[in-house]
């Protein structure tokens, strides 16, 4: 177990080093986000997971899984925000195609649908916080209560019309893991080939066939972990996802790739209507 854990950690360290080198090697701000969003998250997740295996502790493995889940949930969001800020700051240079230039649509916003506060959920989240920290003390309880309160207060921004469908999660997770491996392999290759000859950056507008904000947000996050793509803007009315492409071939090819991810996302959610055929 120690040898396996060391090998997993060494793999994570190697991926993290490639991500750091990509921040220096890639030519533009948006292209650097591909390395920091994809490879850095996977690298750190493997390091903490390997540490749990090497320590032969299921408790540490469980904490490592929580850390990995947190990374894969937050990294696409930070990549989207930083990428959008870089574009608005005029740092998107050398684009061979740019659908976002001149676009006047407003960014999509999640409006609260309910403001009810559940003390049962709040207490449960506080308990989970204390278990994760493995410390039952007044300070940990107060910190957990504050974090749980913030989570419960923000919960109202979730679109209640869509809920996770358990039967669709395994298929989505399996295909998503395959996309993640392909994505990191492609980024690693680009980092190692110093010439960057294969990089042709573009921003493509992809009209989403489904009108659910929950599905759109899931697609935007998933796109940031797929090979050569990163979401930089999501607008409503119409619902359009603007995707930064690292290896641009054609608008049609990019739309097809994103629509495939959208179909995966819709299968995970209970949707009131399905309009993917349009």
Image (spheres, grey):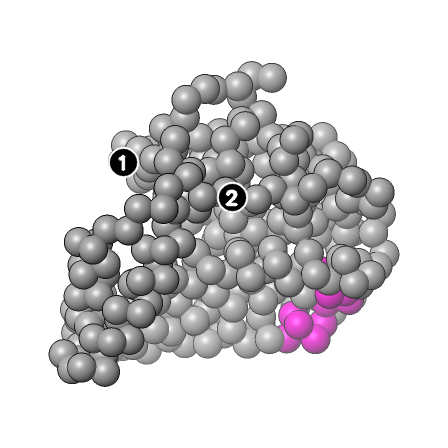
Quarter of the image for the C terminus: give it: top right
- Magenta stretch? 21-30
Residue 19 appears left or right of 115: right
> Is 275 rendered above or below residue 47?
above
Residue at which label 2 appears: 110
In this rendering, position of residue 260 left or right of residue 58: right
Mark closer to the observer (2, 1): 2
Seen at 76% across and 57% down, the residue is 87
Which corner quadrant holds the N terminus?
A: bottom left
Tell me the quarter of the picture where residue 276 sits: top right
Few, some or many residues within 10 Å of mark 2 (<14, 14–19, 20+):
few
Residue at image x 26%, y 69%? Answer: 145
Location of residue 92 in the rendering, given as x and y in whole percent from the top left corner: 79, 58
**Residue 16 image position (x, y, % from top left):** 51, 73
For residue 182, say whether it is visible.
no
Magenta span includes 23: yes
In the image, 182 versus 91, the foreground residue is: 91
Q: Secondary structure at mark 1?
A: helix
Q: Quickly name the residue at label 1.
A: 166
Mark 2 vs 1, N-terminal side:
2
């Amino acid at each position: 177990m120690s040898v396996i854990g060391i090998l997993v950690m060494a793999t994570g360290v190697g991926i993290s080093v490639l991500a750091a080198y990509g921040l220096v090697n890639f030519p533009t701000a948006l292209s650097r986000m591909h390395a920091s969003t994809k490879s850095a998250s996977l690298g750190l997740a493997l390091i903490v997971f390997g540490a749990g295996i090497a320590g032969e502790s299921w408790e540490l493995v469980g904490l490592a899984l929580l850390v990995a889940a947190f990374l894969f949930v937050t990294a696409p969001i930070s990549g989207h925000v930083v990428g959008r800020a870089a574009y608005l700051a005029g740092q998107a240079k050398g684009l061979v195609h740019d659908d976002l230039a001149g676009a006047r649509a407003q960014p999509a916003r999640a409006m609260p649908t309910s403001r009810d506060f559940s003390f049962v959920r709040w207490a449960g989240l506080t308990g989970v916080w204390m278990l994760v920290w493995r410390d039952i003390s007044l300070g940990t309880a107060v910190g957990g209560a504050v974090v749980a309160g913030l989570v419960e207060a923000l919960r109202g921004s979730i679109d209640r019309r869509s809920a996770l469908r358990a039967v669709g999660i395994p298929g989505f997770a399996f295909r998503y893991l395959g996309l993640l491996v392909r994505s990191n392999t492609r980024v690693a290759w680009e980092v190692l080939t110093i010439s960057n000859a294969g990089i042709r950056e573009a921003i493509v507008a992809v009209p989403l066939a489904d009108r659910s904000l929950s599905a759109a947000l899931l697609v935007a996050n998933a796109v940031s972990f797929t090979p050569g793509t990163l979401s930089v803007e999501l607008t409503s009315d119409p619902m359009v996802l603007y995707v930064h492409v690292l290896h641009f071939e054609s608008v049609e090819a990019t739309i097809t790739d994103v629509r495939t991810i959208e179909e995966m996302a819709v299968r995970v959610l209970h949707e009131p209507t399905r309009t993917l055929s349009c």
